[in-house]
Image (cartoon, rainbow, N blue to C red):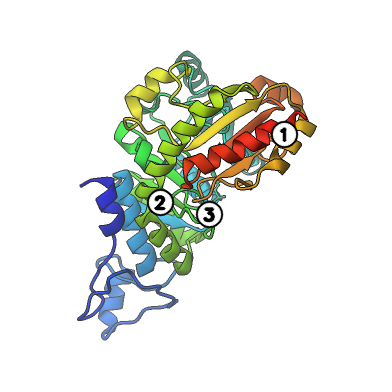
Amino acid sequence: MDIFTKAVHAGDRKRPGPAIPSTTPIYLASTYLYERVEELDRIFGREAEGQSYARYDNPTNAALEELLTALEGGAGALATSSGMGAVHLALLTALTDRRKSVLAADALYGATVSLLLTVLEPLGVGVRFVDMCDLEAVRAAIAAERPGCLLVESTSNPLLRVPPLDHLARLARGAGAALVVDGTFATPLVLRPLEHGAHLVVHSLTKYLAGHGDVLGGAVVADADHLATLRSYSRIFGPVLGSFESYLAMRGIKTFPLRMERQCANACRVAAWLAAHPRVERVYFPADPAHPDAAQIRRLFAPDRYGAIVSFELKGARQPEVFRFMDSLRLIVRGTTLGDVHSLLLYPVMSSHREISPKQRQRMGIRENLLRLSVGIEAVEDIVADLEQALDRFAE
Ligand SMILES: *Cc1c(COP(=O)(O)O)cnc(C)c1O
């Protein structure tokens, strides 16, 4: 079944009684009881499926989890209270029965780096960073560190590098390590990491999947080998998503493929337009034939879908000019997030990469004139017109 069909059918229309609700209701009950205690006994004993307590099971979450499993092609999923909760849970699941060492991509979401360095490393987990697009470097790091887990984002932020997930999965499996992929930027419309050999996929539902700027949530989708551990850990430390957020996420996902398809198409147009503008120094976008990972992109991405983030550099701009450009925007929202229905612009040096030293930022290729645009579903002419009038002003 196609992802457009799954998005509106998977998980819904379960029969709680004689009638079948057209969409899954919000279940707020903290506890569930049965006609006969024996039934609850069997559920507690895991001999039968069913609800007993909201930290263990919730029908609204179960519907969302079934939907996410269908979108990613996994064995099962767990909805969490944030994307970071999902990253944490996925890493602990991956490291169970493996060496307590993570080989992580050198370009990762800021809070993920903090999780590794300020939470996991002090607990004794080995942490090392490597350029995941450089397979020779990855091979050497695996040989040196013998990691229990590789952690990578399917599209890096903000320079949109695309690591060879299929090759990384082979290397990880050869070394007995798990491959955990944060698929937030690419989304399952563009790339489904489990199909390329990853063990666990993480999402911030807050971004494209829920998509309307009104939900904080996350998810882990697991293969069959990791599902039991994932569920068991969630029951123990309880990072579960509330059922209201779960409902909103599911409602959002019904139009996710439609939104994302449009956002991908808009992003292609915006990237091409920016690349031809005399005040734009450089554009980073996976559709660029000169992209350093063009081979991976051709192999891994769905045809004609490149994601909906466009990063670009303003020619000759330093911080005051970047601020002037941002202050001139009338339509595009200056917000720190991404993936909403409306276009959003972020200045990495000021926000997502603020804590990184200028020297380190320079090494990462994140320049003072770099902006990251999350392209929305608006008419693309209106997005371009807003960019055009702001580009006309920033250097004045
Ligand atoms: C936003 C984001 C996260 C964290 O998600 P929250 O829902 O904010 O906790 C993790 N990874 C990536 C790539 C993100 O963009």
What's the residue at 43%, 57% (across, down)? 79
At 40% across and 24% down in the image, what residue appears?
164
Residue 323, by quadrant, is: top right
Q: Disc 2 marks which amino acid? A: Leu
Compare residues 173 and 253 and report the one nearer the observer: 253
Query: Mark 3: is the Cβ under 8 angstroms from ligand 1?
Result: yes
Marks 3 and 1, how far apart at CA: 38 Å
Residue 154 lies, in percent from the top left, at: 45, 33
* Mark closer to the chain start, 2 or 3: 3
* Mark 2 lies on residue: 230
Q: Which sits earlier in the primary sequence, circle 3 or circle 1? A: 3
- Indicate which label's residue lies in the foreground, 3 or 1: 1
How far across and how far down the image is residue 8, in percent? 29, 57
Question: Residue under circle 1?
Answer: 393
125 or 255, nearer to the observer = 255
Direction bottom: furthest residue: 35
The residue closer to the viewer here, 21 or 323, is: 323
Tag nearer the camera, 2 or 3:
3
Other residues around mark 1 within 10 Å, as few (<14) / some (14–19) / many (≥20): some
Q: Nearer the viewer, residue 132 or 170?
A: 132
Q: Secondary structure at mark 1?
A: helix
Q: Which mark is residue 82?
A: 3
Which residue type does callout 1 highlight? Arg
On-image quarter of the C terminus:
top right
User: Residue 167's image quarter?
Assistant: top left
Instruction: Tell me the SS state at disc 3.
Output: loop
Q: x, y (%) of residue 186?
A: 43, 37
Give SS at disc 2. helix
Kind of residue sitting beneath label 3: Ser
Proximity of marks 3 and 1: CB atoms separated by less than 8 Å: no
